[in-house]
Image: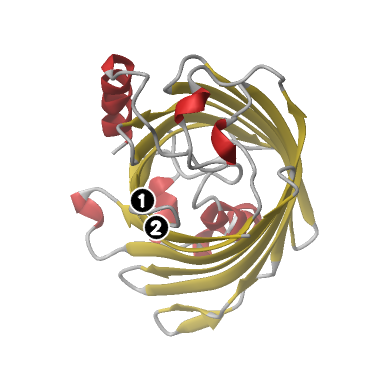
Amino acid sequence: MCVGSFVIMFSSLRLSAKEPFACPDSTDFSEKFYRSEEKLDLQVPQSFEGRTAKDERKINGVELFERVRFERTDGKVELRGTATVFDFDYVKDKLDLQIYKSRGLKPGSNTCMDCHGGKLSRTTVTVGQETQELIPKPIVRGNIKFTLDDAAVESAHITLNHWLNPRIMATADYKAGELHQAGISLNSVAAGFGLLGNVGSRFFWNGKVVLSKTESYKSKKTLTGKLTWAAGKRLKLSVGGGAFLDGYTHFGTDMSELGVMTVNLEKNDPELLPSLFTRLKKDRFGYLQTAIQYDYPF
């Protein structure tokens, strides 16, 4: 799926800039409420058959004054191993503030009549902060049952978007924060670089490389990609995925909650780690993502 996003990128370059296009998510703010549901399914090598992990999310957000966005995510993670049941919930709050919008408009922006009256800034800078709480459920491993400590993540981030031409945008972001669990605090950073664009009037795509580093762990690389179809002015359907090139992460990517939740086990009781984590510390694997979003503009 990540490769597919980059393939479509080159198709975008050849399309006429005069065609109308769908407005990409998260690149410029409007005034609306929105709700979405997402599902992520872990994709592991065949030798791991019988082990599954999924993350189901419900997201509610609001954008105000074309400058502010608040979003709350309620997630449920379920991991099933050959002998382990490992579930937990999480709540994440994210607040974004767009602090800069260039006076110059996106090239060809007067062809976009569905978002911001056809006036999209060519360059934007957004800052924000996130807080996340993770609440574990009892872990069942054979005849043994035990409970992990709650965990939390606090971070701040900055994102730069710049339209290179009427259909291609470059994006870069940086995030820094701390992970907390059972008296353990770890500094973490992540940087992402990617491209985003449109194909025709209703499809848009993005592809991204994320480099993440958590204190006392090696740096990790992740590739992500997503294709979105604007089924109407309010409804969006998406399919995407990611590939972890150096094992599972602890910060800055989708499904990093799996890493956060096991920080204490990794350091103090590694023998209790589900075998899926033991095997995926350095292995390459990925996930598939599907999503549906509905907007309520006002």
Which residue is at a point 56% across and 25% down the rendered structure image?
A: 171
Task: Name the amino acid, label 2.
Answer: Ala
Tell me if mark 1 has few (under 14), some (14-19) or many (20+) residues whose alpha carbon lies within 10 angstroms of its own.
some
State the image coordinates of residue 15 (x, y, percent, origin top left): 28, 19
Residue 178 in sight: no
State the image coordinates of residue 106 (x, y, percent, origin top left): 56, 21
Q: Is residue 45 above or below residue 105?
A: below
Viewport quadrant of the N terminus: top left
Q: Is residue 18 left or right of residue 180?
A: left
* Mark with earlier residue (2, 1): 1
Image quarter of residue 234 = bottom left
What SS does tag 1 mark? strand
Q: Is residue 46 left or right of residue 123?
A: left
Picture disc at residue 291: 2
> Label 1 belongs to which residue?
238
Q: Is residue 219 above or below residue 203?
A: above
Viewport quadrant of the C terminus: bottom right
Residue 165 in sight: yes
Comparing 182 with 229, the one in front is 229
Task: Name the amino acid, label 1.
Answer: Ser
What SS does tag 2 mark? strand
Asked whether disc 2 touches disc 1, contact meaning CB atoms under 8 Å apart, the reply is yes
